[in-house]
Image (cartoon, helix red, strand yellow):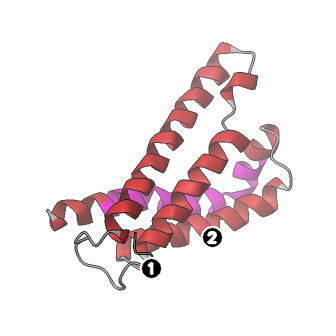
Amino acid sequence: MEVLILVGRIMFGMIFLASGIAGHLLQAEGTAGYAKMRGVPNAEMLVRLSGVLIAAGGLGVILGIYIDLAALGLAAYSVIAMFMVHHFWTDTDEMPTNMEMSMFMKNLSIAGGGLIILALASTGTDMGWTLTDALFSL
């Protein structure tokens, strides 16, 4: 079972590692433009900051470095992004509404996955290969 958890961790962490580096850091201007269009204040600074944080969180989940804290941080980021960026209920055109609703639901699902990783890691489940033990004990 720990092999499945390790593979799942890698898959879960990769979306954040890739998005943090490619989308938030290497393409910060474009991502910040989108965030600003969606009403995010200080968009460029927040995009760069979130890029560093989600890349680090993704790496933490993948490598098993305080995996519970990393998963909690990524779940929190996903929920914040749901409401700050993907607020589909404020859109008036059908196409943006559908796209933002899909992104909102994707983030909802990812946040749930992060909470599952947090619960497993912090209750002593064998998480496969890790560099550190869990930080929390539930």
Identity of the residue drawn at 44% across and 55% down: 115
Classed neighbour count for the residue bearing mark 2: other residues with Cα under 10 Å, few (<14), some (14–19), many (≥20): some
Query: Residue under circle 1?
Result: 135
Q: Is residue 85 visible?
A: no
Q: Which mark is residue 52?
A: 2
Residue 93 drawn at (x, y percent) = 71, 15
Q: Nearer the viewer, residue 49 or 78?
A: 78
Magenta-span inclusion, residue 18: yes
Q: Amino acid at mark 1?
A: Leu
Image quadrant assignment for residue 123 = bottom left
Residue 135 drawn at (x, y percent) = 44, 79
Q: CA distance from mark 2 to mark 1?
A: 21 Å
Residue occupying the far right of the picture: 42
Residue 118 drawn at (x, y percent) = 41, 63
Magenta-span inclusion, residue 1: no
In the displayed structure image, the side of residue 127 where residue 79 appears, left or right: right
